[in-house]
Amino acid sequence: MRIDVLTKEYPPAIYGGAGVHAAELVRALREVADTDVRVRCFGAERDEEGTTAYPDLAELSDANGALQTMGVDLAIAADTEGADLVHSHTWYANFAGHVASLLGGMPHVITAHSLEPLRPWKAEQLGGGYRVSSWIEKTAYEAAAGVIAVSDGMRKDILRSYPDIDEAKVHVVHNGIDSELWSRVEDPDVLRKHGVDPDRPAVIFVGRITRQKGLPYFLRAARALPPEVQLILCAGAPDTPEIKAEVKGLIDELKAERDGVVWIGEMLPRHEVIALLSGSTVFACPSVYEPLGIVNLEAMACEVAVVATATGGIPEVVVDGETGWLVPIEQVQDGTGTPVDPEKFVKDLGDALVEAVSDEERAREYGRAGRERAVEHFSWAAIAERTRKVYEEVLRGWAAK
């Protein structure tokens, strides 16, 4: 079986969970018998057998970003001839998968990592390009032979956002974690390098500066933390200048009130992220939109207790009272994920953070339980097998048409 995996992100150019998923899934699928996996990704040439990269078209260098994406997608689609199935990740590659399916007559499978209707703030970032990305996603999803949701919560979002999709073709296969790559490593020198005191408790956030990650709510909630608790913010790649300015202002306010606020804006090597996670008391995931949240699995694999919003697929990963604390949230049903009562959400988040850092032994117990859960339920080998079964089911249905 030849599978062409289509993705914008692929190592070393990874900036989000979708890229991590694509890379790890490919690695695991290549270990499955009778599976020929070929990767077609965006950007500079990769030094990896079976992987082809496609740069932006020079003719579209001054065009809207959505049109640049479509140009790359057409180049990718032209090279998929001979594949038994094409599998795309995110709207950036969905157009390539859709066109490839029309052109080559093979089924197109999509993994849903996020949904454009549930990220309306992207209009700030993409302008008219958001209307184009939304059209691409809707068209590709409704025509796809199969859709893989990374959580049951995500499956519900897909069917709510695109009610014309046959629910029988939407399958749930969770994200995974490489528990060998992600495991606890205590390295006080890395902490000191970034201005973190290894002997003080700490709450850590790791994620992009984007509306869905809920960082402004977290920064307001952090005011409730005891003064001895440090705040580590591995937060970069802002979506817009506006949200970057908002986050910077909130961080500056915190720094004026307390010491131990560390903001790391650049993307760090994995071993440094692992060291920072391992040196923290608790990991915070204040997202208002999260189909699953690989970051939670990464923290759990490093034996760190998690405080996270009870939204999307997060409750399928974090077990309240066992691997961490889930913070309830009532959300406006307009696609933004905005809390109905933002002040209540901030207070509840702050209360959970304070409880988490108040008993370090319990936090350590939750962290050990989180590691066990990540290893047992979210291995990439198991996820590759489940994904392969989806391929087989889709191909049987396609052949019967």
Image (cartoon, helix red, strand yellow):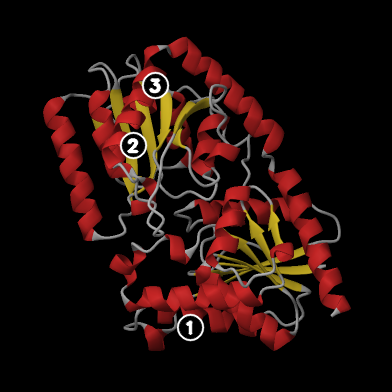
Q: Position of residue 234 (x, y in %)?
A: 35, 40
| Category of crowding for the residue at label 2, using alpha-carbon neighbours closer than 10 angstroms: few (below 14), some (14–19), many (at least 20) | many
Residue at mark 2: 345
Position of residue 95 relative to residue 50, above or below, is below
Q: Give the number of the mark in front: 3 or 2.
A: 2
Residue at mark 3: 188
Callout 3 secondary element: helix
Q: Nearer the viewer, residue 22 or 389?
A: 389
Q: Position of residue 45 (x, y in %)?
A: 53, 69
| Category of crowding for the residue at label 1, using alpha-carbon neighbours closer than 10 angstroms: few (below 14), some (14–19), many (at least 20) | many
Residue at mark 1: 71
Which kind of residue does numbered mark 1 sit on?
Gly
Callout 2 secondary element: helix
Q: Position of residue 207 (x, y in %)?
A: 39, 45
Query: At x 32% / y 16%, what residue is drawn?
Result: 200
With 284 as the anchor, is 393 left or right in this view?
A: right
- Which comes sooner in the sequence, label 3 or label 2? 3
Position of residue 294 relative to residue 94, above or below, is above
**Label 1 with label 3: CB-CB less than 8 Å:** no
Which kind of residue does numbered mark 3 sit on?
Pro
Callout 1 secondary element: helix
- Which comes sooner in the sequence, label 1 or label 3? 1
Which quarter of the figure is the N terminus placed in? Answer: bottom right
